[in-house]
Amino acid sequence: MSIKKIKVISRNPDNYLRETKHDIHKVPRNYDPDLHPLEAVREYKLALNAVKLERVFAKPFVGSLTHSEGVTAMCRHPNRLSNVFTGTVDGQLHLWNLPHKKCEWTVQAHSGQVWSILSAPDGQSFFSVGNDKTIKRWSLDSAFDGKDLPVDTWMCETMVTGITHHRHRNEFITCGERILLWDASTKAPKFSYDWSTTGDKNEASVVAVKFNPVETDIFASSDHANNLVLYDVRAKEVKKLKMTLRINALAWNPMEAFILTAASEDYNCYSFDIRNMDKPNRIVSVHEGHTSAVIDLDYSPTGREFCSGSYDKSVRIFRVDETKCRDVYHTKRMFKINCVLWSADSKYILSGSSDHNLRIWKAKAHEKMGAKRYREDAAINYAEELKRKYGHFPEMRRILRHRHLPKHIYHAKKEHAIIKESQARKEDNRRRHSKPGTVPHVPATQKVVVGLQDEEPEAGPSME
């Protein structure tokens, strides 16, 4: 005879029976009216519904503004949130009214491509540079009055590809074959900033130059020789990093003066800490996701996020402390992204592409624009708090991260993952079959930097 093991549900009578008939009945319940036995389950269900509704209402595209040629440069109006300046390949400048999607002013500013547009800190004028080797200053009043003549013009010996203005002084810096410091009151450049202080020209033409908005005596530049150079106008110290590939654009964090973000030709964006440029931890974060060269980037006014535009026909939004993008924007008819711009109220993102269009996107794809009632605003805040509380759950994280991508980006992403895996496997095999220490582990943040060069100029920048 076999003995079988039977499992039964056991209940302890002490938990629900009275010892005597005069005792109070034991009821297993919580008398706190604010608590519920299924509170966590209910909250998780609400959080899951909030995440799903976020993806349902994620419609970031607002509208597009059509130009006669490809958009190559953009600039915020210094005094008006609703206006933006754009430059095109055929040398035209436009002033757009974004809410009405109307062009309020157009002028043939240059005989070639407009490379950069910059608003002056005084709030009364803006600069433009183009292929015709000229730097032109335009008055904001003349733009609204319909006048077509610039306030001032500076002639250069070579083509100018970028411009940046000092925050307080009436000085600006241009880049091209050389980095030149100009005084707005004179017609000739004051100084030429070259890595060699002997007056010789740089090895390669400069791609981008940017003044630090907080530490106003520091500016950064990148050139076609894959160099990232930091200059100090007080001529105390300069540093140069040699990168593996070229840097196409630079942007300073408006809230943290020591963070410099660079858009690289190797499909990534790199955030540098300029306090540690001579140390291995110089790169704070590597922002991945693009499948082609990153052309331009711009920071949010809050300094917490930045947007980037790439040759892969997409716009991505990154948080400063994260490697993966928060969101990716794309359309079927959008071509290469030449420039991106974050609006001054941190609500919208503008992208200019080669298909003659300036597109307007919402910074948060699911955010409702316009006036909201108190109860609606409270519900939105509650949903955001639930997503923050339960965002680490697998199902929540999967829905939050998922994005539909175009075919060319999707397949390129898979191909790049295979290439990275193959390179890592090859390096691991080489390390396994070599002598200990001959093939060291090199972090990904250090592989992109080829070398560092320090120089302390004695006489300062060379005079023109």
Image: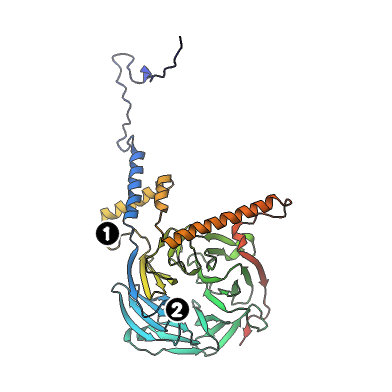
What element does badge 1 sit on? loop
Q: Residue furthest right?
A: 435
Q: Which quadrant holds the N terminus?
A: top left
- In the displayed structure, would residue 248 be above or below residue 459? above
Query: Residue at the spot x=60%, y=78% of the render?
Result: 204
- The percent position of residue 2, horizontal first and vertical second, equals 46, 11
Asked if residue 44 lies left or right of residue 236, the reply is left
- In the displayed structure, would residue 135 be above or below residue 82? below
| Three-letter amino acid code at the position of disc 2 | Leu
The disc label shown at residue 118, or none? 2
Colouring chosen for the image of the structure: rainbow
Provide the residue designation for mark 1.
372
- In the displayed structure, would residue 282 be above or below residue 216? above
- Pick whichever, 215 or 64, lies toward us: 64
- The percent position of residue 100, horizontal first and vertical second, equals 28, 74
- Mark 1 surroundings within 10 Å by alpha-carbon count, few (fewer than 14), some (14 through 19), many (20 or more): few
- The percent position of residue 341, horizontal first and vertical second, equals 42, 70
